[in-house]
Amino acid sequence: MSIHKEVKKVTTHVLLEMKSSGEKISMLTAYDYTMAKIVDHAGIDVILVGDSASNVMAGHETTLPITLDQMIYHASSVVRAVDRALIVVDLPFGSYQGNSKEALNTAIRIMKESGAHAVKLEGGSEVTESIQRILTAGIPVMGHLGLTPQSIYKFGTYNVRAKEELEAKKLVEDAHALEKAGCFALVLEKIPAKLAEKVAKEMIIPVIGIGAGGGVDGQVLVFHDMVGLNNEFNPRFLRRYLNLYDDIKGAVGNYIKDVKSKDFPNSNEQY
Ligand code: KIV
């Protein structure tokens, strides 16, 4: 029996049940009311209000510039649209790394001002104190390891992480530390599939991958990439389900043509 079909509202406990029954978890990003409504009605399990909004909504090169107020704006738009999915919101760069009190205050602002259900933050053992402090306020926390885009200037590239033994060993240790600290789930981004599978097997909590192969407990993609709104981003892990860039460009081109030729509006399209 599919938990997905039975459940009216996805909670962190439902995700744990999905993992233990072998049902894969589906997760996508959303940043606004209209798209979040479609994604929720389609039956997605988890919606991530990702700090990738910095890239795909605001046009920044990295996720670093997006502010806490901007994340709350996106998250509250998503919350107004969604009935079923669990809504997780990224803590933006610079809003939690200072100390655990800062992390708690940021998480509380997100929960109070947006109405979301959980937060996500990047990092391993260095953020476990913050995770524990956020949990004291009853706020569920999702971890994020591997390619953590907020550290892009440390990495220097968006290449696959943890290919070397030392980094792979640290990633496994960090994953265990995050589970021990109380995370309800973990995102693994752009790491070798075998390593991701090993982590997922060792964890009780669900491991959700992006560019981490099929041996994990669920998959996440950035919505704009998945529907082909962005035709400049072509990583190997991305499967495009639509080509909306071309479709929308074509539709806008047709509209321009109709306006210029005075074909639009016709006599039925006016009062
Ligand atoms: O911000 C985001 O979209 C993310 C996903 C890539 C996991 O963190």
Image: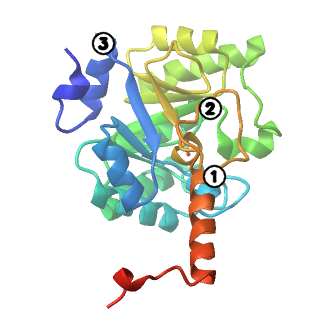
Q: Classify 10 Å Cα crowding around label 1: few (below 14), some (14-19), many (20 and above).
A: some
Q: Which residue lies furthest to the bottom in this view?
A: 271
Quarter of the C terminus within the rendering:
bottom left
Q: Which residue is drawn at 69% across and 47% down?
A: 231
Q: What element carries label 3?
A: helix
Q: Residue at x 34, y 37 (%)?
A: 44
Name the side, left or right, on which 146 lies relative to 185. right
Q: Which amino acid does label 1 sit on?
A: Asp
Q: What residue type is labelled 3?
A: Ser
Tag in front: 1 or 3: 1
How far apart, in angstroms, are the residues tagged by discs 2 and 1? Answer: 17 Å
Quick check: which quadrant has ligand 1? top right
Q: Which residue is drawn at 16% across and 37% down?
A: 8
Q: What element carries label 2?
A: loop
Q: Can residue 234 be seen in this view?
A: yes
Name the side, left or right, on which 216 lies relative to 190. left
2 or 3: tag closer to the N-terminus: 3
Q: What residue type is labelled 2?
A: Leu
Tag in front: 2 or 1: 1
State the image coordinates of residue 151 (x, y, percent, origin top left): 71, 43
Q: Residue furthest right?
A: 156
Q: Do the numbered discs 1 and 3 sit on residues whose CB atoms are within 8 Å?
A: no
Q: Which residue is drawn at 56% across and 50% down?
A: 244
Q: Do the numbered discs 2 and 1 sit on residues whose CB atoms are within 8 Å?
A: no
Name the side, left or right, on which 83 lies relative to 39. left
Q: Name the residue under label 2.
A: 238
How far apart, in angstroms, are the residues tagged by discs 1 and 3? Answer: 41 Å
Cβ of mark 1 under 8 Å from ligand 1: the answer is no
Q: Mark 3 points at which residue?
A: 20
Q: Mark 1 points at which residue?
A: 246
Q: Can residue 93 be seen in this view?
A: no
